[in-house]
Image (spheres, rainbow, N blue to C red):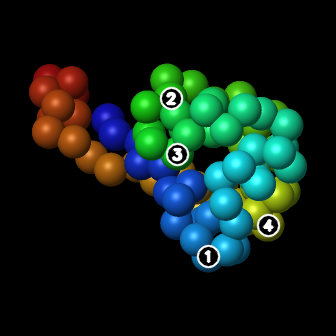
Amino acid sequence: MTIVVNLDVMLAKRKMKLNTLAEIIGITPQNLSVLKAGRAKAVRFSTLDAICRALDCQPADLLAYQQGEDDEQDAI
């Protein structure tokens, strides 16, 4: 299973910088960068809520499921 994070796309659409978003939602730019790069192992619903409010978007605008090669093996 692969979850793709499209935070960079939404930031570009809203013409907002990562540091600005981090300041608005109250987390460090480094933590937001980890999420943006897709390296985060988890995201709090409160953080997701704050991002969606700041960017005026839905969670589905930020996260997408992409089937990976290992998904077929997991089903067996």
Disc 2 residue type (three-letter): Ala
For label 3, the SS is: helix
In this rendering, which labeled residue sits more in front, label 3 or label 4? 3
Alpha-carbon span between mark 3 and mark 4: 17 Å
* Distance (Cα) linking label 3 and label 1: 15 Å
The reply to whether residue 4 is visible in this rendering is yes
Give the structural element (helix, strand or loop) at label 2: loop
Q: Which residue is mark 1?
A: 13
State the count of labels.
Answer: 4
Q: Which residue is mark 2?
A: 40
Task: Pinpoint residue 44: horizontal percent, then vertical percent.
Answer: 71, 29
Q: Which residue shows up at 43% across the image and 31% down it?
A: 39
Name which of mark 1 and mark 4 comes first in the sequence: 1
Mark 1 → mark 4, Cα distance in angstroms: 11 Å
Residue 45 can be seen in this image:
no
- Give the alpha-carbon distance from disc 2 to disc 3, as whole Å: 8 Å
For the N terminus, the image quarter is top left
Residue 74 in which image quadrant? top left
| Residue name at image x 52 percent, y 66 percent | 9
Badge 1 vs badge 4, beta-carbon distance below 8 Å: no
Q: Residues within 10 Å of mark 4 (few under 14, many from 20)?
A: few
Label located before the other in sequence (1 or 2): 1
- Label 4: element kind: loop
User: Residue 5: percent from the left, percent from the top?
Assistant: 48, 49
Q: Position of residue 42 (x, y in %)?
A: 57, 25
Judging by the rendered image, the residue that carries numbered circle 3 is 36
- Which residue carries the number 4 mark? 56
